[in-house]
Image: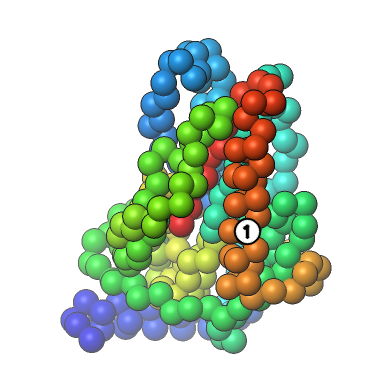
Amino acid sequence: MNRFTKFLAAVTMLISTSVIAQDFQGIATYKSHRKMDIKLDSSQMNSDMHKRMMDMMKKQFEKTYHLSFTKEESLFKEEEQLEAPQRQGMMVVMVETGGSDVMYKNTKEKRYTNQNESFSKLFLIQDKLEDIDWKLGNETKNIGEYTAYKATFTREVEVRESGISVNGDKDLDEEAEPEMEEITITAWYTPEIPVSAGPRNYHGLPGLILEVDDGRGGTLMCSKVVLNPEKSIEIKEPKKGQKINQEKYDAIMEKKMEEMRERRRNSRERRDGNSVEIRIGG
């Protein structure tokens, strides 16, 4: 354990003593954002159509989430809102791997439950929480009223260019072996809120994660934290859906994606309007 890690552990312990005696809980609000730099052939999409598509994508990626947490449990879910209708003549198919509808985590029992609706079917993905090999740094910045510390980890993911298919003219699914790349995920956490919780599947740091950069242009930024609210928080683990582990769920999703690609290939000559598929995540 290096000197900084020892110092951080001591600071965390001191802060924890002020809240350990009470039923410590809170609610954190996050905003999502994704950088987009998409260049398309003008023969496939005119400037007006491109602008409409970008506006729809921006609304899809800019969402609000709430993380309810105690010292050992957390529940992460999207804020409910009405979906805007898609404009006539354009269909956008969003496929986000690694996303979640409702994510419950129990850090004491080292497990999670992800209630996820995919392809009109509700799944209840239950599996163990994997340890994340965070590298703690000494860089800090202020996020709201909290001092946040930087932490990073790396992983390999499949290389994706723009991840876009227009009218089925460009396939995302050529049967070549996928090219892999190493990306770095960056998180900012605060020991001032001594819980090992965070948005989505991020966890395992000595303080609440306030910001995450997924290494592929996507960010989650905490905009508000309410600690020990007047109305007590009740964290309920999702129970509805087909129970399945993560490996089996991933296999089902890959099969469904392949079926979609095959249908797209077979229907090119019959398709009306414009279809755009965006696949993100890793």
Quadrant hosting residue 226? bottom right
Residue at disc 1, secondary structure: helix
Compared to residue 263, the image places residue 234 above or below, namely below
Quadrant hosting residue 271? top right
The residue positioned farthest toward the right in the image shown: 240
In this picture, residue 162 sits left or right of residue 129: left
74 and 239: which is toward the camera:
239
Label 1: few (<14), some or many (≥20) within 10 Å?
A: few
Compared to residue 35, the image places residue 70 above or below, namely below
238 and 206: which is toward the camera:
238
Q: Residue at 66% across / 29% down in the picture?
A: 91
- Locate residue 238, reporting x and y percent: 75, 69
From the image, which quarter does the N terminus lie in?
A: bottom left
Question: How many circles with numbers are drawn on the protein?
Answer: 1
Q: Residue at 40% across / 65% down in the picture?
A: 190
Residue 162 appears in the figure: yes
In this picture, residue 89 sits left or right of residue 282: right
Compared to residue 97, the image places residue 16 above or below, namely below
Figure colour scheme:
rainbow
263 and 226: which is toward the camera:
263
Indicate the amino acid at tag 1. Lys
Quadrant hosting residue 111? bottom right
- Locate residue 43, reporting x and y percent: 46, 15
Compared to residue 266, the image places residue 23 above or below, namely below
Residue 232 appears in the figure: no
Q: Residue at 71% across / 30% down in the picture?
A: 84
For disc 1, the marked residue is: 255
- Locate residue 19, reporting x and y percent: 52, 78
In this picture, residue 95 sits left or right of residue 11: right
- Locate residue 77, reporting x and y percent: 65, 57
Q: Residue at 56% across / 20% down in the picture?
A: 52
